[in-house]
Image: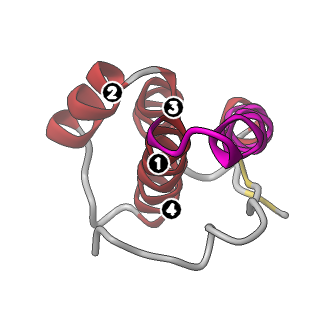
Amino acid sequence: MEQLSTYPEESKKLSIIGYLTWIGFAIALIKGDLKDDYFRFHINQSLMIHLAGMAGFFVPVVGLVFSMISLVFWIVALCGAIKGEKRKVPLISDIELLN
């Protein structure tokens, strides 16, 4: 966990918005700057959490457990974004889909 108080407030706000819903993710992706390391970290993690939650929705039996784990990851990541930290979530934080 890395404290990042030097990043602009706009990046922090967009990172928080990116975690809220798919619409929030789309708004943050459109308005945000992927060159900003803090924003890129959180938007990637948000995308992975959203995709994991969606995958859990489509798998009947294991999906409930998968969705609950995604919810816990979402809460941890959102709290990190609110505090201005890069809080890595297990299993998915090292996967980068957006560069």
User: Looking at the picture, how far across and down is residue 62, in whole percent?
Assistant: 69, 48
Mark 2 to mark 1 CA distance (whole Å): 14 Å
Mark 3, mark 4: which one is toward the viewer? 3
Instruction: Tell me whether circle 2 and circle 3 mark residues in contact (CB < 8 Å).
Output: no
Q: Earlier in the sequence, mark 3 or mark 4?
A: 3
- Name the amino acid, label 4: Phe
Q: Residue type at mark 3?
A: Tyr
Residue placed furthest toward the front: 61
Label 3, secondary structure: give it.
Answer: helix
* Location of mark 2 (residue): 22
Q: Is 40 situated above or below 49?
A: below
- Neighbor class of circle 1 (other Cα within 10 Å; few <14, some 14-19, many 20+) is some
> Which residue was labeled with disc 3?
19
Residue that carries the numbered disc 1 in the rendered image: 55
Which one is closest to the eye, mark 2 or mark 3? 2
> Residue 82 or 21: which is nearer the viewer?
21
Tell me where the magenta segment starts and ends, as one range.
58-78
State which mark lies toward you, 4 or 2: 2
94 versus 82 height, above or below: below
